[in-house]
Structure formats: structure tokens, C-alpha cells
Amino acid sequence: MRVFSKQFNLMHSLFQHPRSNRIYEFHSLFSIFQQRKVLVLNLGIIFCFFLFSIQSLAQSSSDTDYKWSVDKVAELPEPFTNGAVSLSSVGFETYIYVFGGVDSSLSSSGIHRRCYKVNITNPGDVKRLQDLPDTLGRIALSASRIKNKIYIVGGYYVFPDGSEKSSNLVHEFDILGDTFTSKNIVLPVPIDDHVQDVWRDSLLYIINGWYDSTNVRRTQIYNPVSNNWSIGTPYNSTMIPTFGASGGINGDFIYIQGGARSDRNAFPSISAYYKGTINPNFPSQISWQTKTSNDSVTSYRSAIVFDGSENPAIIGGCRRSYNYNARDYSTGALLKPLERSIVLDNSITTYDDPELLFQDKNIKIPMDIRDWGIQRDISFVLSSNSSNYSITYLAGGILENGKVSTQILSITPNFPSIIKKVETISETTFFPIPTNNIVEVSYSSFSSSKIKIFNSSGQVVEELNQTEPEFTFDMTNFKSGVYFYVDPVNQISKKLIKK
């Protein structure tokens, strides 16, 4: 049973979040549940490389049994979850930024303002940034980059008496100067645990989320050039606003799945799947539609990523909603991550077999994926085929037994037709992968070619003029990270990992 009592605090002039004010008839020992909803998702950052959207290799709906590879690319300087995560590339370097969140204690006292910049091209390069320009730490905030600025939006405070308050603050961070600007940006409606993404590197969309005492049905759009807000088309009356949903923008389309609804006695996670179409001539106009969903596939604080056929996929997260201490809102049980991927098209297909999700069983995707960083639309040419991929980075998050992660992960979907082309038709082998130095390459059929090695920013770091079907190349001087081998003549592409 849950009580929705409004509690006024003279010191803070705020409402206690209903999500925190609950009574458990059979779980009275869990007084910790008087805190608030779980906004744990700073896991920030799926390195979800969406390897290759090859135009000429369009795939049928039956050819969607992806196998995801998960790679650790760097370490955070401390355990991190439920904060904001973003990404930028400067020259040949790619950086992950984390802002605020909660530490390994998963307690209100562990909520902080600390911020870091991690070079994932050179993983040992970590910089402590200026703290969030606020008086208190926040969780359930989100970050998105537009051009050379990162916008850190909303979140909520937890006060010593257990009361909570959604924030109306938006901070602008300059990635060139590594500093917060003095620009004054205030949300029209305070928000936390919302869906947030950028349209065409120009407008910031902030959709739904939680405001003090309930979920809100609102789309707030920020234009950093004019420093003005506009209101976008909200969900219609048949759609369910949630907190902790997975969502993102791909092209002119918004995809949102799952999250937790506001019920009188609980915060059940849902499986609803919605698609919004942005009118490019009037970007505040959004045409919403409900997509077919599978009621058995509920999702809470998962990451959403996109493949070349524009089918969104949901990665990781948890089936049930939980508070920021990783405990189930309804039962108080400590929850664990759900290791699965869901591909969304007109229906939802779920893959619960971990073999389809992981290549490295020693690396686990956490839950509490509140935010992530995406490197979009990196392109190169494989002969006449234009190839694009996006890299999504996950930072931190919550693992089994409530352990807060320090890992930055990359997740790469391998498309069956490309895997078949590289490994079966050509029978080309690369050994060893991952590598510390020398890579041996062997082709069964080969024509002389100029081979290019790209880094994760899409920049050429080495060219190989090869005339023989068997050769080696040296990655000793490469920085640790992920690279792409592209042979346009023999139509071969391969992801390489330098330890």
C-alpha cells in the first residue's frame, strides 16, 4: 500500500516525492524505501557502435537476430550511476563526460556534484572537471551535446529529511574550454528521469519524466541559439507518460519504450512503445503513434540504440522499476540487470539468450542506464557502398548485488549478412583480436588493395598498400580502443580492438 501524503518542508519549500513515501505491509524493515524513485540510469553510455548500416545490404525482417559484442573501453575514476553522460570528439580524441549522480553507497548521502572527462581513445587520460554549478548534488539528470556545448538538464535533489524536489536547472558546458558557461537557462517545468535527445544538432527535446509528485505529459524543446523554449506536441490521451523510459531521436523520428507509470499503489514498469514523427518545417509539431508491443516485454532504464534499417533496439536495463538504491518499488527486493536485447519494429521481438547479446562473458551490461553518449553517423566508403555506424557509450551503472560499476562499455551489433560476408564468403581471418601489437591477416581470395584503418571517430589512422593475401600489420603504437579495418577492393570490413 502506498500513501500519497503531501509533506511541506519549510526549509526547502518542497513536496516529498510520492515515490518515496510508501508503506510496505510486509517489508517494514525496508525503511530505506522512503527515498525516491530509482533514477539510476547514468550508466551512461552505451558504446553501442551500431556497426554498419550498409545501404545495399538491406535486411529482411527475418534477418534481425543480432549478436551483440560488448567491449570495455575505459574506466571511470570512481563508481558512478544515475548521473548524466555525454560524448564529444576533438581531433582524433573521443571523450566521455559524466556529471553528478550517486556513488557506490546508493544512498542519499552519496549523491554528489562531481564531474569527469574520460578520454576513451587514451583510457589513462582522465580529468576532474568543475563541479556542477549547484548547491546540492543531483540524480536522474540527463546530458546532450549540440555542436560544442553539452546541456545538462533537470534531475532531482534528495534532502536530509528524505524529501525530494525536481530541478528546473539547465547547465551549459563548453567542451572546448572544459568549463560551465554563465548562460542562464531555466526549464519551464522542472523535470527528472525524462527522455532527452537532440534533433539535427540544433534543438533539444525533453519528453515527459517526473515532476515532484507525478509523471508529466509534456514535450519541452530548447533552442540554444535563441535561448528560448517552445512546447512540442504532447502524448495524446491514450498514451501513458512514464519515468525511466528508454528513448531517443533517429532522423526525424522519436522512439520511446517502457518506463514506469504512476499508479496509486505502485510504479509498475510497462511495455508500451511509441513513435513520434517531427515535422521538419515546424519542429514543435510531432505526430505520435502507438506501435504494437508485447506485454511480456517490460523495460525500465534501458538504453535505446538504432541500426541501419532504422529499427530501434533496447539494450539491458531491468524488467521492474526500482528506487535509486536498486530495490524494487513494490517488494523492496534488490534487483539485478536484465541481460537481453529487444529489437523493435512493428512488433517487439525479445532475445533472452545471452549468447545473442554477448561475445565476452566476462563483461556484463548493467542496469540503471539513465543516460548514454552517442557518436552518430560516422561514415566511410566500402567500395560503392556507403557505410554508417553510430557509437553509443555506457558509463557506470548498477551490476548484480547492487554493485556500482566503474566501466565504460561499447556495444556493437554485428549484422548477420556482414558477418557472413567477412567470415564465410571470403574466409578472411584476423588474429589475434583483441591484440596488443601484431595482427595477422589471411585472405582466401585477394586482389591488391589500399586498406584503411579508421578510429572510432571515423578518421583514417593508417593506410596499408597490400599486394599479397597474407600479411601482418603492427598496432603497437595505436592507443587502446576500437578501430575499423576497411578493404574497399575485396569488400572486407572488420572491427579491431587494441588492448
Image (cartoon, rainbow, N blue to C red):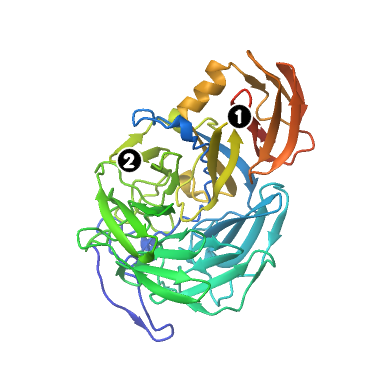
Residue at horizontal 43 percent and vertical 43 percent from the top: 316
Contact flag, marks 2 and 1 (Cβ < 8 Å)? no
Residue 163 seen anywhere in this rendered image of the structure? no
Position of residue 51 relative to residue 42, above or below, is above
Which one is in front, 338 or 56? 56
- Within the image, what quadrant is residue 239 found in? bottom left
Which one is in front, 355 or 460? 460
Residue 388 seen anywhere in this rendered image of the structure? yes
- Within the image, what quadrant is residue 63 found in? top left
Residue 494 is labelled as 1
What's the residue type where badge 2 is placed?
Asp
Position of residue 45 relative to residue 39, above or below, is above
Give x and y (percent) for residue 290: 25, 51
Instruction: Name the quarter where the C terminus is drawn.
Output: top right
Position of residue 153 relative to residue 387, above or below, is below
Residue at horizontal 42 percent and vertical 75 percent from the top: 229
Q: Residue furthest right?
A: 477
